Image (cartoon, rainbow, N blue to C red):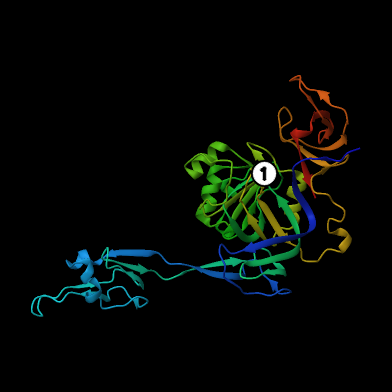
């Protein structure tokens, strides 16, 4: 029988994980293969050109563009500080000379005899790439970045907003069906990754931002709350560039959806440990899931590093989540994968999967309506 495949989320107690850390343009790699690095350690650095400041100096001095070079006190390539004189007119019989001070610090990049403009280039902006994952450098990509590897516990979410964040895992819910409200967030959670159970309320997000929480994670969030938090409707194509100050990750979906018990127990078992999170989500080509990555204290044995696992493989016994009504959000296990196509209520033909839900009921749904929970 042919193997069935379906999109899936990783919820793994232990796997070997690699991440590529690249600069936006060529620069310097600061580590070597075999080096141990921490999550927030800088592994590569480059510099972006500073801002260009155009100054219509000829007009400011009241001279012709062709006379500008003779009035300049500075040359191309010279660095000036804010307030330094850039140019001085000859005046009349040595009197009434006019000077123009530099409006900012930078390097003179160009002096145009045609337009009478001087281009002042600001100081270069340093761009640094951190390891993101506490682990070992297994590959150096010359002038671009590195690949970091570690044995980790990994939880991928359904949806997130905000970029990379770091902190210790703090559990604030006693069960996966307990809402994450503003009442459970305190000043002690500054710089932490706060784990709730069911819905993240809008007030909880505001409190997390105010306190300085690195990230909040729970089962679901209301789309109305999300709209109020952001101030606009969020497109579903790509997220991760939002500047909230707190990264948000939901593991199940939109609405009042309890976090899967398996996910909750895994996060609870690592309470107090350092973790890295990334809320970036992309559901177009090149799917990208938000994630919580927790380096393990004890390395895995070779046989426990996801040996033989085929990503996306759907088989009897696989754990799945139903992602369409009428069983939306329900978790269960695959009990049968009928080979023949079945006519659906819509009168279309499709291959289906039989799933035993967590409450014991047996349902038959199209294979496209389930998502694999890998781990």
Q: Position of residue 294 (x, y in %)?
A: 71, 59
The tally of labels here is 1
Please provide percent x and percent y for residue 68.
23, 71
- Tell me the residue at 58%/55% (across/down): 163
**Residue in the image at 82% along x and 42% along y:** 319
Residue 148, x across and y down, in percent: 70, 65
Residue, x 87% and y 63% (percent of image)? 302
| Rendering quarter of residue 132 | bottom right
Q: Decide which of 226, 370 is in the foreground and name it.
A: 370
Q: Looking at the image, which residue sits at the far bottom?
A: 94
* Residue 108 percent across, percent down from the top left: 35, 73
Which residue is most to the right? 1
Horizontal side of residue 170 vs 47, given as left or right: right
**Which one is nearer the viewer's eye here, 260 or 352?**
352
Q: Is residue 174 above or below residue 349?
A: below
Q: Secondary structure at mark 1?
A: loop
From the viewer's perspective, tell me whether residue 318 is left or right of residue 132. Answer: right
In the foreground, 15 or 358: 15
Classify the position of the N terminus by image quarter: top right
In the displayed structure image, the side of residue 330 where residue 355 appears, left or right: right
In the rendered image, the vertical position of residue 213 relative to residue 177, given as above or below:
below
Image quadrant assignment for residue 315: top right
Characterize the local packing of mark 1: few (<14), some (14-19) or many (20 or more) Cα atoms within 10 angstroms.
many
Compared with 21, 336 (above or below) is above
Q: Dividing the picture into quarters, in which one does residue 111 lie?
A: bottom left
Q: Nearer the viewer, residue 237 or 70?
A: 70
The single residue placed furthest to the left in the displayed view is 93
Identify residue for label 1.
158
């Amino acid at each position: 029988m042919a193997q069935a495949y379906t999109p899936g989320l990783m919820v793994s107690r232990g796997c070997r994980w690699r991440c590529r850390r690249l600069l936006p343009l060529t620069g310097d790699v600061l580590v070597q293969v075999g080096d141990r690095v921490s999550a927030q350690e800088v592994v590569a650095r480059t510099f972006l050109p500073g801002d260009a400041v155009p100054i219509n100096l000829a007009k400011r001095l009241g001279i012709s563009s062709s006379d500008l070079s003779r009035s300049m006190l500075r040359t191309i390539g010279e660095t000036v500080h804010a307030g330094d004189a850039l140019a001085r007119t000859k005046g009349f019989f040595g009197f009434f000379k006019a000077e123009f001070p530099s409006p900012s610090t930078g390097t003179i990049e160009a002096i145009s005899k045609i337009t009478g403009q001087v281009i002042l280039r600001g100081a270069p902006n340093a761009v640094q790439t951190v390891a993101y994952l506490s682990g070992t450098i297994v590959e150096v990509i010359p002038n671009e970045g590195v690949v970091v590897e570690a044995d980790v516990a990994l939880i991928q979410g359904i949806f997130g907003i905000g970029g990379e964040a770091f902190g210790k895992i703090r559990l604030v819910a006693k069960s996966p069906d307990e809402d994450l409200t503003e009442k459970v967030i305190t000043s002690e959670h500054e710089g932490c990754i706060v784990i709730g159970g069911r819905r993240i309320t809008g007030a909880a997000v505001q409190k997390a931002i105010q306190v300085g929480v690195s990230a909040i994670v729970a089962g679901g969030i209301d789309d109305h709350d999300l709209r109020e938090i952001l101030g606009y409707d969020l497109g579903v194509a790509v997220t991760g560039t939002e500047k909230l100050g707190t990264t948000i990750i939901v593991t199940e979906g939109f609405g009042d959806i309890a976090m899967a018990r398996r996910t909750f127990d895994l996060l609870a078992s690592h309470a107090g440990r350092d973790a890295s999170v990334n809320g970036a989500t992309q559901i177009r080509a090149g799917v990208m899931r938000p994630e919580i990555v927790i380096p393990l204290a004890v390395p895995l044995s070779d046989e426990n590093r996801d040996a033989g696992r085929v990503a996306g493989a759907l088989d009897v016994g696989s754990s799945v989540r139903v992602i369409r009504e009428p069983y939306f959000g329900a978790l269960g296990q695959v009990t049968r994968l009928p080979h023949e196509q079945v006519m659906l209520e819509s009168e279309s033909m499709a291959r289906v999967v039989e799933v035993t839900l967590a409450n014991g009921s047996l349902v038959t749904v199209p294979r496209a309506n389930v998502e694999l929970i890998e781990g």
